[in-house]
Image: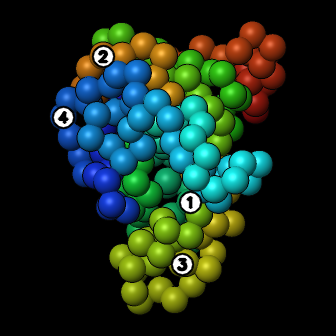
Amino acid sequence: TVLQILITPPEEDVSTPIEPGQFDFEGLRGDKHYGLTLLTHGRQPEYPRGTAIRNTRQITILSREDLITTSAELGIEKIDIRWLAGNLLVTGFPYLSLLPLGSRFLFQNGVVLVCNGENDPCSKPARITQENYPEKTNVKSKFVKAAMHRRGVTAWVEHPGSMQSNEEFHIELPAPWDPYWKELIDK
């Protein structure tokens, strides 16, 4: 189930809830990661900085379950998806951050997003989370390790449309992964 839809305005580091979310082939309208292409930066070391490439990280999807586990490991009350500049907060799917490349999110009202893989934790969300817990001095230093494999996935839009909170979705795994995934979630 979709719990929240958010955009991070250009030049901002914190996302803002919106309703509904409008998705087209360039991503989620109004979000800083919107676009068919992006200019490379530190996450694409195989290219010179500033090279235009296909934008496969138009959307960031995080699970409530991963945020709860990470905040418990950090010894804090909660991690708000807004602090992570996330776009979709969902619930009901264990191990979301470990979804294989090519998995499809098929939403009830027709939007389809394709997983481009795990979103590695980074220092900006660590800093913002620390700012929200000034009495805890070690949140920033422990954040990346605590959030590893729990920072959600990035995705790109395969089929556009409108999305509402409380919308249901299901995930279609690439065929070779389906039996392995079932073993993981059955443990």
Tell which circle, 3 or 1, labels the residue nearer the N-terminal end: 1
Give me the C-alpha separation between circle 2 and circle 1.
Answer: 32 Å
**Residue found at x 74% / y 24%:** 181
Asked where in the image residue 35 lies, by quadrant, the reply is top left
Alpha-carbon neighbours of circle 4 within 10 Å: few (<14), some, or many (≥20)?
A: few
Q: Quadrant of the N terminus?
A: top left
Asked where in the image residue 115 lies, by quadrant, the reply is top right
Task: Compare residues 114 and 3 and report the one nearer the observer.
Answer: 114
* In this rendering, the label closer to the viewer, 2 or 3: 2
**Residue found at x 33% / y 60%:** 11
The disc at residue 19 is 4
Tell which circle, 2 or 3, labels the residue nearer the N-terminal end: 3
- Residue placed under numbered mark 2 in the picture: 161
* In this rendering, the label closer to the viewer, 1 or 4: 4
On the picture, is 127 further left or further right than 98?
left
The disc at residue 165 is none
Give me the C-alpha separation between circle 3 and circle 1.
Answer: 11 Å
Asked where in the image residue 114 lies, by quadrant, the reply is top right
Give me the C-alpha separation between circle 2 and circle 3.
Answer: 38 Å
- Residue placed under numbered mark 3 in the picture: 139
Secondary structure under tag 4 reads: loop
- Residue placed under numbered mark 1 in the picture: 70
- Identity of the amino acid at label 2? Gly
Q: Position of residue 26 (x, y in %)?
A: 40, 28
**Residue found at x 31% / y 12%:** 109
- Identity of the amino acid at label 1? Thr
Tell which circle, 4 or 2, labels the residue nearer the N-terminal end: 4
- Identity of the amino acid at label 4? Glu
Q: Position of residue 2 (x, y in %)?
A: 36, 31
